[in-house]
Amino acid sequence: MKTLIAQAAEPSLWSPEWLPLLPKRLVENLLEHFNAPGWLVSIGGIAAGAATVLAVFMTAFALLSLIERKTLARAQNRIGPNRAGPFGILQPVADGIKMLTKEDIVPAKAEKLLHLLAPILIVIPAIMALGVLPYGREWTPVPLELGLLFFFALGALTEVSVFIAGWASGSKFPMLGAMRAISQMVSYELPLVLSAIAVIMVSGTLSLPEIVAHQGGYHLGFLPAWHILTPWGLVGGLVFFIASIGEANRCPFDLPEGESEIVAGHMTEYSGFKYALFFMGEYLGLFAISGLGVTLFLGGWQAPFPGLGFVPSWIWFFAKLAAVIFLFLWIRATFPRLRMDQLMRFGWLALIPMSLLTIPAAGIWTLLHRAGHGLIAWVVTIALLVVPFVIMTVLFNRGLARSNRTYRFAES
Amino acid sequence: MTALLILSPLIMLAALGAVWKARPVHAGLLLALTLSLAGMLYIALGAEFLGLVQFMVYVGAVAVLIVFALLITRPRDEIEEIARRPKSVGPGLLCTLPLLATLLYTVDRTLPEAPPGTADLPVRRIGELLFTTHAPAVLAVAILLTAVMLGAALFAREPSKKP
Amino acid sequence: MNPLAVLLTLSSVLFALGLFAVLTRRNTILVLVGIELMLNAANLNFIGFWRYGPPDPQLTGPMFVLFGIAIAAAEAAVGLAIILMVFRHTRSTDLNASNSLHG
Amino acid sequence: MKPPTQNGPKPKSAKPGKWVVPGLGLLQGLAVTGKNMLQSFYKKERMTTVPYPEQRAPISPNYRNIPFLCYDDDPEAGLRCTACKICEKSCPPECIYIVMDRDENGKALKRPKVFDIDASVCMGCGLCAEVCPFDSIYMDGQFELATDDRFEGLQLHLHDLAKSAEYHLQLRPKEASEVLARRKADAEKKAAKAAAKAKADAEKKAKAEAEQTAKTEDPPKEEGGSE
């Protein structure tokens, strides 16, 4: 046992940078100590790494369900849940118990097996997506060479599981809700992928840790080289962020399961823990997609200022993640829900052209930088992005001026 | 190799289900399952890029599209399907079995001792190849896809009701 | 057990199942399912020969699979659009019902 | 008849010179909620809600729910209600039930023996409070009426209904003070009248006695002449 403690006393094991990897290395040390076979050690390590990621994001999910309600409350000048535990800390526990004790109703006409399978199929891709993101300089649970493509492949899986959830409930309304949700997710995945392509083109790789490494360094001493701070990155980041709201079915685009819409969309016939699984899937999907946004545009675990080497890198990732998710909540507290046709028109006529615009802008940006003319690159890309926006505003205003509203009065 | 032996029977079963299942939506979902298992097989064989593209394009788009079409047309003919099955199975088998026999025969006869082959698929290499040697093909496919998108949108659009 | 043999039998079985589906299914959309199966069997062949064949710097196998996937997606989209048009016209997706040329 | 399509008023944003930049409106919306979010932490008047059971927001004086009977000082004796049953007759859903108190030999005592109000029927219209001539029944502001028994629990009896005048004063300061002032004035007037009457009686009695004493002195003198 003593050698284990000596091993565990390695300075680097307890250093804050390696803290998230502590369980994984402890399990590996333990297995090696009991000289387990090689493959068992690696499996144990992977399991421990996965367990840490899961533990981190389960607590984050519990906290987010509380923080969301408190932030929405604060925006509406009220306090938000503060009954369960001090400041409402135990509210997620209360919700969890409520969900567990609720009776699990399966409608008669439902396909029993698929009805059970759907919530599982929604949570699995969300959790798998969390495994790919680079959280810290040393902490990337699964450093995939095709991390980004893996991410969008999982996005495709959620659509099939949403369909199964809607169709397996048997009745018409969940099916309609599912069709709406799928058409929204499909049409919002396009700008998501297109704006990510701009990032791939600039950083030249599909692997997420390398994209974050590419965003290291500081221009002019203090300006971090994040993609969001470049003109094409700003537009791409905004499009990515708005598309991720659509992809996660969050507030302005939460038509499928909005309260005033078709009951709860594809989740109508679920109750009890299956319903909680849907929520877990939605929140983990929210974490995953905003984590990807942080990695692609906000420079993952890169520190904002040069002098902050002592702070462990994963702190920056989670700080940025918290900021992005606060923005989600803020937007949820502010904007009304879009109608289905407005939602689709906005997706196709506004987001996709803007994301298509970022790709040539990013191309020109890299070429000019490679040719050494940094300043010209800024000017050209800004011009390339701002001019179409101005043109669109002019057309928008002229259209607005010309549009005479036609009123149809009810026949008396 | 072991992954191959696990996945192949699964794919065969899922494909059989997709073909034989009376209820159309079940067949569609089983098709999605076959496609995702095939994607996993590609990844097991070392072609991750193709496996993930298969997931994204086939499972994400084509399978969902097929199942959507099934939803819209909502066929309820699984009863006649079973009723008329004996009549259509005979000729169907009559055509496919000889084809299967010849395929398996050719597989068995022409198979040299397979060298280990390369197990990795460098994505950067694919990118270079796509835009150098196969550049015209990529442009052609791009034009084709846009044409298909517009065509499909025009086809499926409701005839606009004159106000 | 030669892995290439396993792959090729798998793809040929898939192809046969696809053809069987195309021949016996009455619902046009499920005929499309059969076509997708056949295309997938072809892709599988390419990957099998690329993986267990001689090393190929030109990566012709994967290239073919990429274009195959793109074409299959396009084909599925157009096929379904046509099916929807026919369905709107004849209110049924039964393959045998749409055998009249007029109207 | 084709519905008249009429060019509506030009949208404000479309007037020339006023540019509408798409996306600016969104930021203004975010600014509003952001301001709310920030100020709710340090500005008191931002917080409109009150943690209910611990603190209670004051209810407005003209809120009315279920009536109550007012008594001056003693719940039994000081009860203003004289069981005149006017409120019982005037109650639209007839949810008031009064039985007059009678002493042992059946003489009506001006007091209710039984005064029941069915809270589940009472719709809080306030007619009983308007018609009551004896300022006895008023509308209460008490809304926590939840009981676990849906029949007997909602029957409010005399002891539930009787509440002190101070409660009334605290519930509706302005109205209660007027009633009290009026009652005090009536009481004084009555007392004054009673006092005046008492004085008058006293005088009459005194006069009567005086005459009687005078009569007892006169009759022996004129006794012979008057027969």
Image: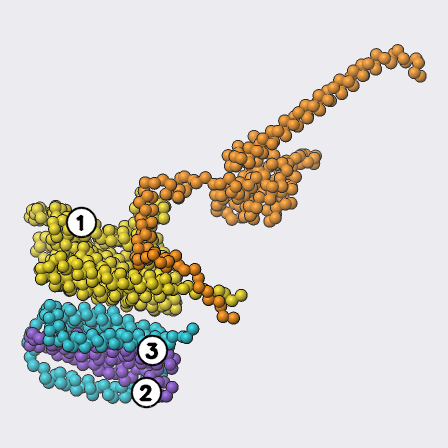
According to the picture, the residue beneath numbered tag 3 turns out to be C84
Residue A165: which quarter of the image?
bottom left
CB under 8 Å between callouts 2 and 3? no
Could you say where residue B62 lies in the image, as x and y percent from the top left?
26, 73
User: CA separation, marks 3 and 1?
Assistant: 52 Å
Residue A241 vs residue D138, the one in the foreground: A241
Residue A147 vs residue A251, the one in the foreground: A251
Which lettered chain is shown in cyan?
B
User: CA separation, marks 1 and 2?
Assistant: 67 Å
According to the picture, the residue beneath numbered tag 2 turns out to be B87
Give the color of chain D as drawn: orange
Q: Residue at x 62, y 41 (%)?
A: D131
Q: Residue at x 65, y 26 (%)?
A: D191
Which lettered chain is shown in yellow?
A
Q: Chain of mark 2?
A: B
Locate residue A191 relative to residue A78 in the image: left or right. Answer: left
User: Mark number for residue A176?
Assistant: none
User: CA separation, marks 2 and 3?
Assistant: 27 Å
Could you say where residue A390 lies in the image, as x and y percent from the top left?
26, 61
Asked whether residue D102 is in view, the answer is yes
